[in-house]
Amino acid sequence: MPTRYYIIAGEASGDLHGSNLIRAIKVQDPDAIIRCWGGDLMQVAGGTLVKHFRDLAFMGFWEVLKNLPTILQNLNFCKKDITDFRPDVLVCIDYPGFNLRIAEWAHEQAYKVAYYISPQVWAWKEKRVIKMKKIIDEMICILPFEKEYFAQKWNWQVHYVGHPLLEVVDKLQKEKATEKIEWHKNLTVSPPPQQPIIALLPGSRQQEIKKVLPALLEVTKLFPQHDFAVALAPGLDPAFYQSMLEPYPQVFQVCNQTHALLMQSAAAIVTSGTATLETALLGIPEIVVYKGSPISFFIAKRLINIPYIALVNLIMNKKVVTELIQDQVTAEQIEKELKQLLFSTPVRLQMGTDYEKLRNQLHTGAKASEKAAEIIVRLSKNISASTSA
């Protein structure tokens, strides 16, 4: 009988990595039947899409609390759908608030559980590891320090497969360097920019975009020798942006071509998340911003114990890119940092050197999705997997 895989991703980045994982699974297990929560990319890759991440992405403590009834409904629906599908293995991709609950339930039901892209327990709520060790059969990590962290602090042997963004970026640099972008202004087709471009990546969730984008748009008035382009999130209706963009007719918009936009940009301002690492691996100078609701930020400050929020800085354990957080996300502060990024040769050279070191740290000699798929396929077929280096 064909092996059945049930994969859950709850965000745009999870959809990207999930799509590459699905392709890798199908290479190693051609008859695989895959049912998934994710997005368009996972569906195109061959998964049967059950729920789209646009209906799942709630960010911040207060936002989760407000949407708790919807989240509980989704949990119950997911459990029933898994029961009906009867997978040989459940694969959770990041999205810990939801996935850890499903993983615990699945373990109780005797399903095998693989977790691809570990929850960031090293940042907050470390004691989750005690339960994770019991309910997860194979933990697959993508950050270089996580393998040692789990082994030394928790006596848990996990797999480190490298970062899946490396294969994404390598492919992009080969295929999309000359991709023709469809430019928009006020969401209608426009002639292309004529000046150096600054990319604005305000995030993928409505809550974070509403908090961050207004300040980013104000910055566009301060750099008349540059053109600015907003990357619209693939999971959102472009009309969502209309009221915010309307007062800025000079600002371009790009739909579903974020990577191509980055590769043609002189610099980028990026909301904290996976996109910050993508931008760095593409070699684009960047400023990282984050702004949440006051309540969520107040709680997070007291719970999260890490020196940086940007993945680039966390991996390198130093300040590689500037981080502007909460009240620092103002047009005036961004203008100051952006001038440094654009016009200071030493700043740009140092960032380029650090980006190269970052890439070397994340490289393992093989594609992360292929190594992850191998572990998952072996688990589904009851074959013991050796711990990856």
Image (tube, rainbow, N blue to C red):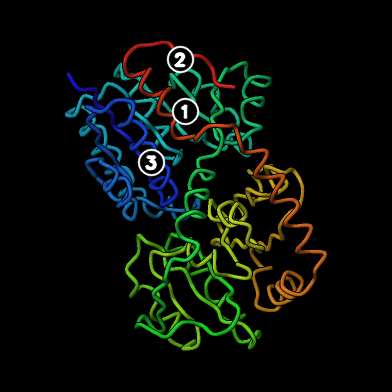
134 versus 327 height, above or below: above
Spatial CA span between label 3 and label 2 = 20 Å
The residue beneath circle 1 is 371
Picture quarter with the C terminus = top right
Q: Residue at x 61, y 82 (%)?
A: 226
206 versus 137 height, above or below: below
Q: Amino acid at mark 3?
A: Gly
Mark 1: which secondary structure?
helix
Q: Amino acid at mark 1?
A: Lys
Between 289 and 179, the one lying in front of the other is 179
Q: Earlier in the sequence, mark 1 or mark 2?
A: 1
Q: Quadrant of residue 205?
A: bottom left
The residue beneath circle 3 is 18
Q: Residue at x 54, y 64 (%)?
A: 263
Q: Earlier in the sequence, mark 3 or mark 2?
A: 3
Mark 3: which secondary structure?
helix
354 left or right, relative to 17: right
Bin the neighbour count of mark 2 within 10 Å (Cα to Cα): few under 14, some 14-19, many 20 and up.
Answer: some
